[in-house]
Each structure stands twice: as C-alpha cells, then as structure tokens.
Image (cartoon, helix red, strand yellow):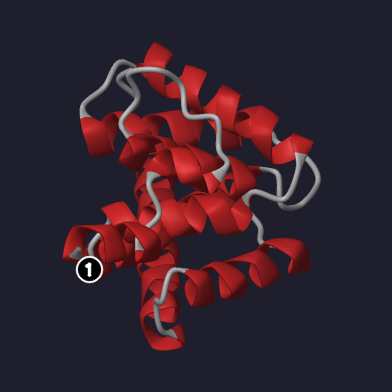
Amino acid sequence: MLKHLKSLLVPEPERTGLKIPENTDPERFALAGLLAEVAMADGIMEEIEVDLAVDLMVRQFAMPSSEARRLIEIAHTQCREGDVLFRFTTMAKEYWPHEERIELIEMLWEVVYADGRQDDFEAGLMRRLGGLLHVTDQDRGAARKRVLARRQKNLYEAVEKAVSGDDDE
C-alpha cells in the first residue's frame, strides 16, 4: 500500500511524458534535457554551448562523448516539440539529491556563459529552474558566482600564457 502511494507521488520516468531513449539512465536524460533547455534559452543553440554541455555530461557520468551528444540531441528535439521543462525538472528532483541539484545549477550556469554573455531569457530561465529544482536564490547565486570566478581565472591564465609566450600548442 505504501509503495503504491509513493508511486503516485513520485513520478516514474515513463509517467513524465518524456520519450527517454531505451537503456538510458533517467538521471542522465534529465541532465541532457536541462542542458538543452538552457543552451537554447536565448533562441540560438550555439555549437560552443552544445560542446560544453557534452563535456559536462562526460565529466558528470564518465560516458562517451558520442553518447552524451546523442542524448542532448534527443532532448533538444523533445524541447522543440513542446513544453518539457517541468518534466525534466521533475525527473531531476527525483534522481538528484538537493546538494547535487546545486551542482546541476552550476553546470547550467556554465552553459549560460559558454558564449561569453547572459541574456535576459537565460537569466529568467535560471530563476525559474532554481524554483522548480527547489534550489534557493542564495545557492543559485553562489553557483553563478563560482562559474564567473572560474571563467575569470581561466581568462587571466590564458592572457598570462599569451603574454609570457608560453604557448605549447
């Protein structure tokens, strides 16, 4: 009886209405979907955003980049076909504990800034995602600041390398 009640409250992946690819972990597909949503939030899904999303999935799940790219493409197709943001966040809440959802928000900020800027649509989506994933504004803001600090550090190191002539490439 308790199991039945829990099944009504906690959605099974197939009950979300998403078309999860066969033999795909719902946790992976949830991340792919959220990365795709953020990458196309400004209306343009740039290659740099897709490449970063693939890299984030590879690092998170130690999976082949070809598989990560395939999941992001499938999720992107579903994003274009209808409003699936709530479904992806519902699945993410089910499979990602709260602390990991803060890390997920940080990954999403990485994609927002992949093209070097944040526009109003992306900012609005990130606020909405914070609420849907039950991540506080404070945690969402701290994740954003960590991403910006890393980007600044990487830029500084690249400039230092260029100025010093230490180019190994």
Task: Farthest residue to the front: give it.
Answer: 1
Query: Residue 24: x percent and y percent?
Result: 35, 24
Using residue 81 as the reference point, say whether residue 99 is left or right of it. Answer: left
- Numbered-mark total: 1
Q: Please tell me whether residue 157 is drawn above or below residue 2 in the rendered image.
A: above
Which residue is more in the foreground, 28 or 147?
28
Query: Residue 48: x percent and y percent?
Result: 59, 32
Image point 68% across, 28% down: which residue? 77
The reply to whether residue 120 is visible in this rendering is yes
Which residue is more in the foreground, 160 or 53?
53
Mark 1 Cα shell of 10 Å, populated few (<14), some (14-19), many (≥20): few
Using residue 60 as the reference point, say whether residue 46 is left or right of it. Answer: right
Quadrant, the N terminus: bottom left
Quadrant assignment, res 62: top left
Query: Residue 125: x percent and y percent?
Result: 65, 65
Using residue 34 as the reference point, say whether residue 47 is left or right of it. Answer: right
- The residue indicated by pointer 1 is 99
Label 1 amino acid? Glu
Image point 44% across, 29% down: which residue? 54
Query: Residue 97: x percent and y percent?
Result: 23, 63
Image point 39% across, 77% down: which residue? 135
Q: Element type at marker 1?
A: helix
Quadrant, the C terminus: top left
Task: Farthest residue to the top: give it.
Answer: 66
Which residue is more in the foreground, 161 or 31?
31
